[in-house]
């Protein structure tokens, strides 16, 4: 049995109220040492509030939050020395050059490693000589990313970090996350780009209305969703009596349907008794799990209304 890794981030029954409104309503979140952990949810789910509490910028109403074993509200300086943070909307000092802004940001954690700084500037194709006031959103984002990765950190908290980057620069960002993981760092990645999360993350937590509703590895979460089948040469009536089969429909000369994970053996057994001309199987993606989960929540809300 593989021993459990030490939690780098741990919250228990975490709440945050703004008047009568609850941004967090008993959030349990665990991020193990050395993993890249995806943190997903739509706008208003409580992701940004959670991150502010983890950074010690906001005090929780109740519950417990620990970062690197410390209370971030009570010991912010100790935690910040070990954390690199990238927000999704970067504001810079307009009179500074990009290079000066990078140096100022890294000085808060002890200064940049010169070799890493130069490598990152080259890889992100960034001109550090221009004034910050001239930078586009993408270039402002590059400043924050270069500053974060120019000095090794134990924990990277990345809140929509690739916002404003083009696809080429998104791949450069992905490379930095992979390097950080190889160095033993822990990464909390909040992103709306589900393909990015699926590509980079070891584990994922999905939150809704301030509560974690799913958490696990991508393999574990796929078992909670459905696999899509496309079969040619078999009638839809073959599938009608099978439990766990959903949304069977004609698609040209084929039949498409979805099957729960525990129904797949029965589906394959039923298909094997017929002459299948073609079979395509599409495993459940993180996007399909996410969208189905929130579609169910929306349907429930509609019924409640």
Image (cartoon, rainbow, N blue to C red):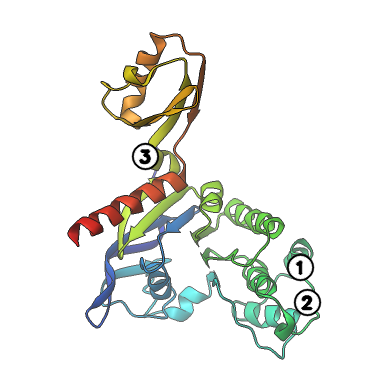
Which mark sits nearer the N-terminus, 2 or 3? Answer: 2
The mark lying in front, picked from 2 and 3, is 3
Give x and y (percent) for residue 165: 66, 64
Side of 168 relative to 42 (left or right): right
Crowding at label 2, few (<14), some or many (≥20) Cα neighbours within 10 Å? some
Q: Which mark is residue 128?
A: 2
Up-down: is 111 above or below 120? Answer: below
Q: Which mark is residue 110?
A: none
Up-down: is 42 above or below 21? Answer: above
User: In the image shown, does 28 or 221 lie closer to the viewer?
Assistant: 221
Give x and y (percent) for residue 225: 37, 39
Residue indicated by mark 3: 225
Residue indicated by mark 1: 121
Under circle 1, the secondary element is helix
Question: What is the quadrant of the C terminus in the image?
Answer: bottom left
- Do the CB atoms of the residues marked 1 and 2 lie less than 8 Å apart? yes
Crowding at label 3, few (<14), some or many (≥20) Cα neighbours within 10 Å? many
């Amino acid at each position: 049995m593989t021993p459990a890794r030490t939690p780098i981030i741990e919250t228990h029954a975490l709440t945050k109220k703004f008047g009568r409104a609850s941004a967090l309503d008993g959030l349990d979140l665990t991020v193990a040492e050395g993993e890249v952990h995806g943190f997903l949810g739509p706008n208003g789910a409580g992701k940004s509030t959670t991150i502010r509490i983890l950074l010690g910028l906001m005090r929780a109403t109740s519950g417990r939050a620990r970062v690197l074993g410390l209370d971030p509200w009570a010991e912010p300086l100790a935690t910040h020395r070990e954390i690199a943070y990238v927000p999704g909307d970067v504001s810079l000092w307009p009179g500074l050059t990009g290079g000066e802004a990078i140096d100022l940001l890294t000085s808060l954690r002890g200064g940049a490693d010169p070799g890493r700084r130069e490598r990152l500037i080259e890889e992100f194709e960034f001109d550090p000589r221009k004034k910050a006031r001239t930078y586009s959103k993408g270039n402002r984002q590059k400043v924050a990313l270069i500053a974060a990765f120019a000095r090794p950190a134990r924990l990277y908290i990345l809140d929509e970090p690739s916002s404003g980057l083009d696809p080429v620069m998104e791949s450069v960002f992905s490379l930095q996350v992979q390097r950080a993981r190889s160095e033993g760092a822990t990464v909390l990645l909040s992103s709306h780009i589900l393909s990015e999360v699926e590509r980079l993350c070891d584990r994922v937590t999905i939150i809704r209305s301030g509560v974690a509703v799913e958490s696990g590895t991508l393999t574990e979460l796929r078992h909670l969703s459905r696999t899509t089948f496309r079969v040619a040469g078999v009638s839809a009536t073959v599938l009608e009596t099978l439990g766990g089969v959903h949304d069977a429909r004609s698609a040209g000369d084929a039949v498409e349907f979805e099957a729960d994970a525990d129904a797949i053996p029965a589906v394959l057994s039923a298909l094997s008794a017929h002459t299948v001309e073609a079979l395509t199987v599409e495993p459940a993606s993180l996007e399909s799990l996410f969208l189905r989960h929130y579609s169910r929540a929306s349907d429930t809300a509609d019924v409640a209304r």
